[in-house]
Image (cartoon, rainbow, N blue to C red):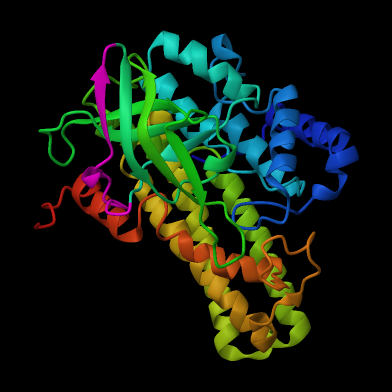
Amino acid sequence: MEFARTPKLEAFADEVRTWLEEHLVGEFADLRGRGGVGQEDVEAEVLLAWERQLASGGWLGLDYPERLGGRDASLAEQVVFHQTYVEARAPGRIPNIGLTLLGPTVVAYGTLEQQERFVPPILAGTEHWCQGYSEPNAGSDLANVSTRAHLVGDRWLVSGQKVWTSLAQVAQWAFVVCRTDPDGERHAGLSYLLVPMDQPGVEVRPIVQVTGGSEFNEVFFDDAETDADLVVGGVGNGWAVAMGTLGFERGASTLGQQTGYRQELDALLDLARRNGALDNPALRQDLMRSYSELEILRYNQLRMLTALVADGVPGPEMSIGKLYWASWHRRLGELGMRVRGASGMVGVDATPPLDDPLGIGYQLDRLQRTFLYSRAHTIYGGSNQIQRNVIGERVLGLPREPR
């Protein structure tokens, strides 16, 4: 699939650009080129307010059905929006887990009642979600989760611990993969529950990262309650629904992501020209390799989108894209430090309390944050090892890995 800009799509891109120009004013005026996954140079509350601003223009529900408040936009329009958004250097989006993960999952697997209850607040930017997948002993091995839920009357009681839970501190709800059949093993007996966060049985503890931020959290459930009918896809079908959720993470926004990566690489090439690093043959070769690999990433993402158009629901082949971009961006972060040289090892003195809320004593620039945070890409959302297993077993049809 190639997204040639027809006159209709060009007009749509103009609509996006015009809206952004008109709304990146006031409190949002200085957000251009700031924010984004792993950067944390903009307060979460400001980015959540920007999500509500996007919602006011109808931009959160592009791929959602009109009956739920969406636009029913074509896949080409969705791609154009994400590309145009990044090209305009609009603010890096806070990970809107409800919009990108829970919402599409409920539309694909949920009941009509669940769709009507949960999708409209997501599209309005008023309810935010976090993902209850990983556990201390079940990181990428999701089938090994030990968080349990049992039904008491008309309520599920959930107990266990989740970890690396992004933005749990601002979420009103969590979708939690837990074991509802105590006799079930591995993939069997798992269910996908929707659990309110604001209740006595839920505790959120921040995890301070090497960047000084605390996007990730531990979440403890101690007989946390949720309604009996807040199971997506039916009791015992949690594995299939959870895999579908991960596939939605790799949809139309991937070409926008690639546009952002192109901007990062262009900025790195400009730095290499200015500081003389481009004269180093080894660095020059690695920079050109990154350029070529980014083109490969683009074509691979187009292929993934072709499969998405054909099937409607993402399949296991989406793991190819996750494995590729995660590894590429991590290498780019490492290459950035080589281009930067010794100065990349030194932070800038911070001025507490505004510039250094955690008291770590220094600030990191964008390149340093990319280097540090990109190391997480090959772990979260399914580690590289897990992606290779998925590709081998579910795409290529190879035998399962011996246990």
User: Which residue is located at x 80 percent, y 48 percent?
Assistant: 31
In the image as oriented, which residue stretches furthest toward the right? 26
Q: Answer above or below: position of 198 versus 331.
A: above
User: Which residue is located at x 43 percent, y 43 percent?
Assistant: 219
In this view, the residue in front, 27 or 29, is 27
In the image as oriented, which residue stretches furthest toward the front? 200
State whether residue 65 appears in this view: yes
User: Which residue is located at x 40 percent, y 25 percent?
Assistant: 194
Asked whether 125 falls inside the magenta stretch, the response is no
In this view, the residue in front, 45 or 245, is 45
In the figure, residue 401 lies in which quadrant? bottom left
State whether residue 73 appears in this view: no
In the figure, residue 281 lies in which quadrant? bottom right
- Locate the C terminus by quadrant: bottom left
Magenta residue span: 136-153
Q: Provide residue 173's location: percent of width, then percent of height.
A: 49, 29
Q: Provide residue 386's location: percent of width, then percent of height.
A: 29, 55
Q: Provide residue 76's location: percent of width, then percent of height.
A: 58, 32
368 lies left or right of 129 = right
Q: Answer above or below: position of 367 versus 206.
A: below
